[in-house]
């Protein structure tokens, strides 16, 4: 994946600067990871809260407390955007990931993927280290309770991240005005409706915002945040633990690689959905007073 950093920073982004702090603890932290991908299989007594690893927490730059990460799982969400990010964060002892929704009743992802949130909006920590969203149903873009939650937690979060159309949802809560961002190639042109600046690249960092495309984008975001907080070695071990070395059957994962014919055919299949989303985004722009 290509990474597009803030063009005015000469490659020095806030994520990289924070990695200097993380780098100081990274070597020691890597030794403390204690990862075992099979530990969870031997902890069936509490499967809803057990992490993949129950080893020694990594040294934290945040006064030794656990990192609080909220990942939105609204009805109609796309699991492909969520599962890899949640897994990457959850593999690290000392990280407290929350799957958040209005309540803890079961929600259904798309395609049909029953999911039970772990934390309600009300119970979600107010001060988050990471607020993350992937693609969800367009109805969530105009849901007052969801937008209020995202705006409130996003106002204090250390990092705000989104993959696929997640940046549009976060933007609908007013969190991306004036920030460079990317999204699913079929919806990225809608970013200006929330005041964001569409920037090419599969992963885009701008100050404390990080965005990516769908599927592998969630994992790409997670490992960059792990690097920023814990250093290079922790990020490297996360990648290795997941054996993340993509070898696509066909190298057509971007419009540039796919060519015009396949791209046009793919866009035609989802054109009605994107058109519907655009109407929603027009109303969002009016509410946000984005011209």
Image (cartoon, rainbow, N blue to C red):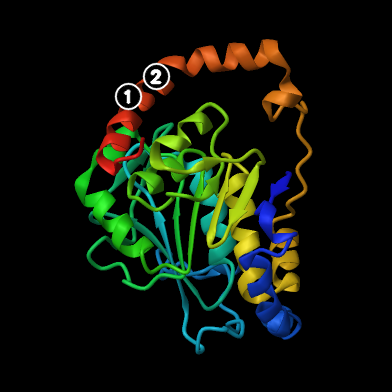
Instruction: Report whether 11 appears left or right of 93.
Output: right
Give the distance between the C-alpha atoms of the residues marked 2 and 1, in whole angstroms.
7 Å
Check the picture and name the quadrant holding the N terminus.
top right
Quadrant housing residue 200 = top right
Taking the spot 76% from the left edge, 82% from the top edge, the residue there is 27
Instruction: Report whether 271 appears left or right of 137.
Output: right
Task: Determine whether label 2 and label 1 are within 8 Å by CB.
Answer: yes
Residue 172: x and y in percent read 34, 44
Quadrant housing residue 41 = bottom right
The answer to whether residue 21 is seen in the rendering is: yes
Residue 48: x and y in percent read 40, 64
Taking the spot 39% from the left edge, 53% from the top edge, the residue there is 175
- Residue corresponding to mark 1: 279
Query: 216 or 182, which is in the foreground?
Result: 182
Furthest residue to the bottom? 63
Residue 50: x and y in percent read 47, 70
Residue 234: x and y in percent read 70, 71
| Labelled disc at residue 275 | 2
């Amino acid at each position: 994946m290509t990474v597009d950093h803030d063009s005015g920073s000469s490659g020095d982004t806030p994520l990289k600067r924070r990695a200097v702090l993380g780098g100081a603890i990274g070597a020691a932290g890597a030794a403390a990871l204690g990862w075992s991908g099979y530990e969870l299989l031997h902890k069936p007594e509490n499967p809803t809260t057990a992490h993949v690893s129950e080893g020694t927490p990594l040294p934290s730059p945040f006064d030794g407390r656990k990192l609080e990460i909220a990942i939105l799982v609204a009805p109609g969400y796309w699991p492909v955007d969520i599962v890899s990010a949640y897994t990457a964060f959850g593999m690290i002892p000392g990280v407290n990931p929350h799957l958040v929704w209005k309540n803890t009743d079961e929600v259904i992802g798309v395609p049909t993927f029953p999911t039970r949130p772990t934390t309600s909006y009300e119970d979600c920590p107010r001060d988050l280290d990471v607020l993350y969203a992937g693609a969800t149903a367009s109805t969530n873009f105009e849901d007052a309770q969801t937008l209020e939650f995202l705006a409130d937690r996003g106002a204090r979060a250390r990092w705000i991240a989104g993959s696929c159309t997640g940046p549009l949802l976060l933007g609908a809560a007013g969190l991306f005005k004036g920030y460079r961002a990317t999204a699913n190639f079929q919806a990225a042109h809608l970013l200006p409706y929330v005041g964001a600046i569409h920037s090419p690249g599969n992963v885009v960092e701008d100050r404390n915002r990080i965005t990516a495309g769908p599927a592998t984008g969630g994992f790409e975001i997670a490992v960059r945040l792990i690097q920023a907080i814990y250093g290079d070695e922790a990020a490297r071990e996360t990648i290795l633990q997941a054996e993340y070395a993509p070898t696509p059957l066909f190298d057509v994962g971007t419009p540039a690689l796919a060519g015009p014919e396949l791209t046009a055919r793919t866009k035609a299949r989802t054109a009605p959905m994107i058109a519907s989303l655009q109407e929603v985004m027009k109303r969002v722009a009016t509410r946000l007073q984005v011209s």
